[in-house]
Amino acid sequence: MAPRLVSGGEEIPRRPLGSTGVEVSVLGFGTAPIGLSNYQLPGYDQRANERLSLDAVAAAIDRGINFFDTAPAYANKVPTNGWSTDRASERMLGLALEGRPRDRLFIATKNMFDRMDAPGIRASLEESLRLLKTDYVDLFRVHGIIAKPFRADNWREFVNDDVLATFEALKDEGKIRFIGISGYREEALCAAIESGHFQVVMPQFNYFHRNAELELVHLAKRRGVAVAPMRPLTGGLMKALIEEIDPEGTLTADPYRVAMQYILGFDSVATIPVGMRTVAEVEHNVQLVCELEGRRRAA
Ligand SMILES: NC(=O)c1ccc[n+]([C@@H]2O[C@H](COP(=O)([O-])OP(=O)(O)OC[C@H]3O[C@@H](n4cnc5c(N)ncnc54)[C@H](OP(=O)(O)O)[C@@H]3O)[C@@H](O)[C@H]2O)c1
C-alpha cells in the first residue's frame, strides 16, 4: 500500500490490524456523529450538515485515513418501523468514497441487529453494499448494542452457530474480508476472542472506560486479534466534563490529546475510529496522532 502524506509532508502512521496482514491508519473515522441527528450534540441536525460531513470524510481520505467505521444503526430511526433506520452514515460514506481507489480504503460496517438470522444478516449486508457503492466490505461485525448486552455466559445464544456460519459463508463468497464483533462487556468479548471466529473486536475503551486494559487488550495481542475501540475519545463524556469545569473555554492543555495518548499506548489497538464532523476536527486529530505516534515510536 503506497504511503500517503499529510499536508505537512508527514506520513500518517499505520498499525497492523492484528494478524490479518493489513495495515490501517492509526486514526480511523467513526461515522456515528455524521449519521445521527442529536448524537452527543443536542440540536445537531444530521441532514442540514451533510455537506460538512462529506467534506470531513474527503479531508480524512486526503490526509491518509483509510479505516472507516460505519453501521446501519448510525442513522436516524424511522419511527413507525421498529429498529429501522434511514442508514444515513452508510449512505454518506458511500457518497464520500465514490471515485476513490477502493483497494486503498478499509470499510468496516456491522449488521443491523434487529434480525440476527441468516436472511436478516444477508439482507443487512446487501443494503450496506448498495449504499456504500461497493461489492465487498473489509470488515463485517456483529453489532452488540446496549439493548442486547450479551455476557460471557450467553453471547453464543445471541451469536449462535447460524450467525457464525452466515458470516463465514459471506467471507467465502468474497462479500466480506474479515469478521468482527462489538460489545459492552469485556468478558464476553474475551470469550469471542478465544473462540477464534473474529479478527477484530470493538470494546468500549477510552480514558474513562478502562476495563479492557485489565485483560482484553493483552488477550487480543496474544491471539493476534485487533482492537478497534468504540468511543476512543470518551464518546462525549470528555466534552461534558470540560463544559462543566471550564465553561469559559480557558483551558490551555488539550484533554483530547491526553485521551488519545492513553488509548494509543496499547499495542493491540490497531486504529481509533474517532467520531468527527468537520474538516477542522480531522486536521486537529491527524496532527495529534502523528505527534503522539511519532513520540511513541521514537521512545
Ligand atoms: N456499539 C458500537 O459498535 C459502537 C457504539 C458507539 C460508537 N461506535 C463507533 O465508535 C466511533 C467513535 O465513537 P464516538 O463517535 O461515539 O465518540 P469518540 O470518537 O470517542 O468522540 C467523539 C467526540 O469527540 C469530539 N471530538 C473529536 N475530535 C475532537 C477534537 N479534535 N477536539 C475536540 N473534540 C473532538 C467530538 O466532538 P463533536 O461532537 O463536537 O463533533 C465528539 O463529541 C463512532 O463514531 C462509531 O463509529 C460503535
Image (cartoon, rainbow, N blue to C red):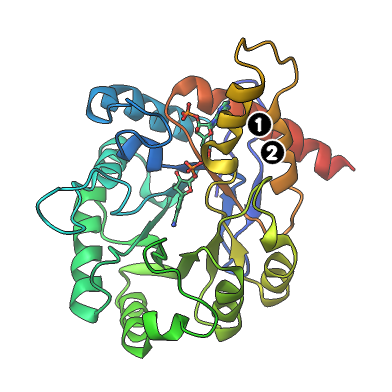
**Position of residue 164 in the picture relative to residue 290 (left or right):** left
- Asked if the residue at label 1 sits under 8 Å from ligand 1, the reply is yes
Which x, y percent locates residue 107?
40, 53
How many residues crowd mark 2 within 10 Å: few (<14), some (14–19), many (20+)? some
Which x, y percent locates residue 236?
52, 36
Q: Nearer the viewer, residue 13 or 93?
A: 93
Residue 124 in view (yes/no): yes
Give the residue at x 54% y 66%: 200
Which label sits on residue 256?
1
Give the residue at x 44% y 85%: 156
**Position of residue 228 in the picture relative to residue 295 (left or right):** left
Q: Quadrant of the C terminus?
A: top right
The residue to which callout 2 is attached is 259
Q: Is 34 drawn above or below residue 225 in the view shown?
A: above
Q: Quadrant of residue 226?
A: bottom right
Q: Secondary structure at mark 1?
A: helix
How many residues crowd mark 1 within 10 Å: few (<14), some (14–19), many (20+)? some
**Position of residue 154 in the picture relative to residue 21 (left or right):** left
